[in-house]
Image (cartoon, rainbow, N blue to C red):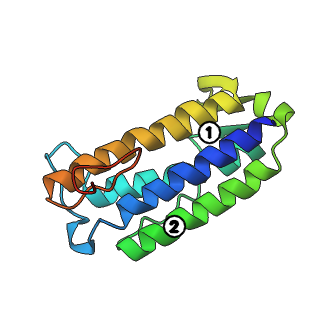
């Protein structure tokens, strides 16, 4: 099996699970925060949705430089926009992954800020470490936000207390 095939399967599965969480976030809760130092539920959900937008440049570019202004996606203000953005980012990521060879995925990719190299590692590791692990971590935070708002938490890897 090619490296991209396993990653494509995982991205499809995890993205579908993430949509189940996004579908539970009502528009009126987008500004809610569990603590003054925490992101709002809307900001956190937007971050989760935008993480998959990194997959395309990781595959198609040699590096990303945080010191260069970019075209960051416009954050969603509603659940409908959030779901639309998420689906668009995932579709673009899947298209980029479809064309990614093992050679491309095993080649190094750099994240930097000007001349400072934050890391330089194989793309496949960046996709796992920076995208998927990060994506799943923050998605887990969203389930806590749902619970704290007495919103039903969907089962992700099995049933939740709300879905038996």
Residue at the image position 63 percent from the left and 27 percent from the top: 115
Vertical side of 9 occupied by 116: above or below? above
Residue at the image position 30 percent from the left and 44 percent from the top: 141
Find residue 136 and report its horizontal and vertical position in percent.
Answer: 44, 41
Q: Is residue 69 visible?
A: no
**Residue situated in front as seen by the camera: 142 or 163:** 163
- Residue extending farthest to the front is 164
Q: Which residue is mark 2?
A: 85
Q: Which residue is mark 1?
A: 65
- Is residue 9 toward the left or the right of residue 18 in the image? right
Vertical side of 146 occupied by 36: above or below? above
The residues tagged by marks 1 and 2 sit, at their Cα atoms, a distance apart of: 23 Å
Total numbered badges shown on the rendered structure: 2
Q: Is residue 15 visible?
A: yes
Vertical side of 70 occupied by 30: above or below? below
Residue at the image position 56 percent from the left and 65 percent from the top: 87
First along the sequence among labels 1 and 2: 1
Q: Which image quarter is the N terminus in?
A: top right
Residue at the image position 67 percent from the left and 41 percent from the top: 7
**Residue situated in front as seen by the camera: 116 or 148:** 148
> At numbered mark 2, what does the secondary structure look like: helix, strand or loop?
helix
């Amino acid at each position: 099996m090619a490296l991209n095939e396993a990653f494509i399967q995982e991205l499809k599965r995890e993205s579908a699970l993430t949509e189940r969480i996004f579908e539970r976030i009502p528009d009126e809760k987008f500004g809610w925060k569990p603590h003054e130092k925490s992101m709002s539920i809307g900001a956190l959900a937007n971050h989760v949705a935008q993480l998959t937008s990194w997959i395309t440049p990781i595959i198609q570019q040699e590096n990303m430089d945080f010191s260069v202004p970019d075209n960051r996606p416009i954050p969603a203000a509603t659940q409908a926009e959030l779901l639309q953005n998420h689906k668009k980012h995932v579709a673009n990521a899947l298209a980029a992954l479809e064309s990614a060879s093992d050679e491309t995925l095993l080649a190094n990719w750099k994240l930097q800020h000007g001349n400072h190299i934050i890391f330089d590692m194989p793309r496949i590791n960046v996709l796992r470490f920076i995208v998927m692990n990060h994506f799943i971590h923050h998605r887990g935070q969203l389930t806590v936000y749902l619970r704290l708002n007495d919103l039903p938490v969907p089962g992700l890897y099995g049933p939740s207390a709300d879905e038996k």
